[in-house]
Amino acid sequence: MHLVKIAAPPERVYEALTTTSGIRSWWTRDADLDPTAGGAGTFRFHDGNDVTTVTVKELEPPLHVVWKTTSSSRLQWNGTTIHFDLRVEGGNTALSFAHRGFEQADEHYAQTTTDWGVTLQSLKEYLEK
């Protein structure tokens, strides 16, 4: 889990989380995302050698997004859920993030947690500049 405070309105944060152009601005430039409930997302890294696909499970504009990982070259991600919950806090947006469903808290889990911390900082920097 992570909590990130972002100097941007929730609508902008939500757009960055739910559109292909948004995802390409802070996570990976090689991405496709259908921004509807039930839609699919594909995120490719390292020249397409690391691929994760998701299904958009829940959308509540502009405050809530859930993805379910349907397949990933990071095997421990398969079947996990990724939650983004937004709330207004003092003119900014507080992003509460959780990646849930790991079978065990091992080195892969620890690396995922670290990677998400870095990635969410990238989201913050994109939205604040």
Image (cartoon, helix red, strand yellow):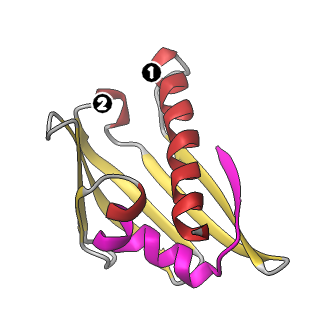
* Quadrant holding the N terminus: top right
Looking at the rendered structure, the secondary structure element under dot 1 is helix
Residue 92 versus residue 103: which sits nearer the camera? 92
Q: Is 69 in front, or is 23? A: 23
- Label 2 neighbourhood size at 10 Å, few (<14), some (14-19), many (20+)? few
Residue denoted by label 1: 108
Quarter of the image where one finds residue 124: bottom right
Q: Is residue 18 positioned above or below 114 on the image?
A: below
Q: Earlier in the sequence, mark 2 or mark 1?
A: 2
Position in image of residue 127 (x %, y %): 55, 69
Q: Residue at x 39, y 72 (%)?
A: 18
Residue 16 falls in image quadrant? bottom left
Secondary structure type for disc 2 = loop
Distance between the alpha carbons at the discs numbered 2 and 1: 9 Å
Image position of 14 with respect to 5: above or below: below
Left or right, residue 76 beside residue 49: right
- Tell me whether circle 2 and circle 1 mark residues in contact (CB < 8 Å): yes
For badge 2, the amino acid type reads: Arg
* Magenta stretch in the rendered image: 1-23
Q: Which residue is mark 2?
A: 74
x and y, in percent, of residue 34 in the image: 24, 73
**x 85%, y 77%: residue:** 90
